[in-house]
Image: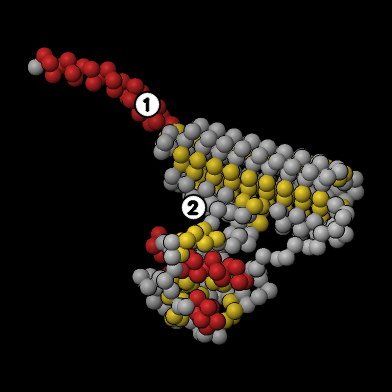
Amino acid sequence: MSQLAFTAQELAARLGGVLHDCPPDRSLTEVKPLEEAGAQAVSFLANPRYHRKALASEAGLILVDAKAELEGKPRLVMENPYWGFAQVVGWLFPEPEPAPWSHHPIHATAKLGAGVRVAPGATVGARAVIGDRTVIHPGVHIGDDCEVGEGCELFSGVVLYRRTRLGDRVRIHANSVIGSDGYGYATVNGRHEKIPQAGYVVLADDVEVGACVTVDRGVIGPTVIGRGTKVDNLCQIAHNVEIGEHCLIVSQVGISGSTTLGDHVTLAGKVGTAGHIHIGSRSIVSGNSMVAKDVPEGSFLSGYLARPHRQWMECQAALNRLPGLIRRLGRLAKEG
C-alpha cells in the first residue's frame, strides 16, 4: 500500500472528471484491478468486456468514461479512464530516487548471508538482502530493496531491478533482465504516454531462467514465476503474468501481459500468447503456435491460431491435398 493518499475530490480535480455516487472526502491510498479492489482503492473500466467485474467490484472509486453504465457505483467520469488510472499509479507510487552511489560495489545497507560470494564488477544496491551461499558472478547488478534467497546463482550480466524477489536455489543465466518496465502506454492526443510500472517480480524456489530472458515487473503487484518452473533462453514474459509451478517455457516464447498459466504447462519454442488469457494446468502448446483465448486444463494445442492438436493436423493434411484437388477441378472443367 502507498504511504500517500488522495481524496476522491482531489483526484477529480487533478483528472478533470466528475464524481458520481462517491463521497468527495473518501480517502484513496492504492490502485488495484477491479476484482481485487477494496474501499480505499482506485480502479478503472476502459473495456466493456470487464463490465461485470466493475459491477461486482468493491473499489472505492472506479474511473470510467461517459458510456459506462455503473449506476450506484462510486465512479469518476472522464474522457480517458485508462490514462487517468496510469496517472493515479504515478501519483501514489512515484519512482524513488536511487540511493546515492559510492565507490564500494556493495551498498553499506545491504545484508549478505554466510558464504555469499560476490565477484569483481558486481554491484549490490541499498537494503538488498542476499541469502546464504548465493554466488554472484562478474557484472551482475542487484538493485535496491531486492531479496535473493539461499543457494542462488546469478551469472554474468544479470540485472535485478529494484524490489525483485528470488526464492531459494534460483539460477539466472547470463544477460537476463528481471524487473524491467512492462510495455505499457496510453495514447493521449496522438502521443504514446508511458504507464508507470509500480510492481515487482517474484521468482519462487528452484526456478531456472536461461540467458537473455526478460521478465517485466507488474504495473501494480507482481509478475510471478512459480516454484520449479524452467525458462529457456530468449523468452519474454510481460507485466503481471503469473506462471504456475513446474512449467516448461521453451526458447523464444512470448507471454503477453496479465496472462496466467496453471501448473505443469509446457509452451514449446516460439509460442506466443495474447494478453489476459488463462492456460489451464497440464496443457501443452506445440512450437510456433499462437494462443488467443483461454485454454482448458489438459489441452494439447497447435497452430496459428492454436486449436486442438488433432484438428490442426487434419487441417494441415487437407491443405496439403489442396493443390491436387485444384488440378483435378481444372481437368474436370476442361472435360466438361
- Front position in the image: 243 or 77: 77
Question: Where is residue 255 shown, x and y percent of the image?
Answer: 54, 45
Q: Which mark is residue 276?
A: 2
Please identify the residue farthest to the right as the structure is shown. Answer: 114
The amino acid type of the residue labelled 1 equals Gln
Give the Cα distance between marks 2 and 1.
29 Å
Does 308 appear above or below 118? above
**Residue at screen point 86% across, 42% down:** 119
Q: Residue at image x 64%, y 68%?
A: 93
Q: Which element type, helix, strand or loop, lies under badge 1?
A: helix
Does residue 190 appear in the picture of this structure? yes
Residue 37 drawn at (x, y percent): 55, 68
Q: Please give the residue where the numbered disc 1 appears in the rendered image.
A: 316
Q: Quadrant of the C terminus?
A: top left
Q: What colouring method underlies this structural image?
A: secondary structure
Q: Residue at x 66, y 52 (%)?
A: 179
Q: Residues within 10 Å of mark 1 (few under 14, many from 20)?
A: few
**Three-letter amino acid code at the position of disc 2:** His
Depth check, front residue: 259 or 110: 110
Q: Earlier in the sequence, mark 2 or mark 1?
A: 2
Q: Quadrant of the N terminus?
A: bottom right
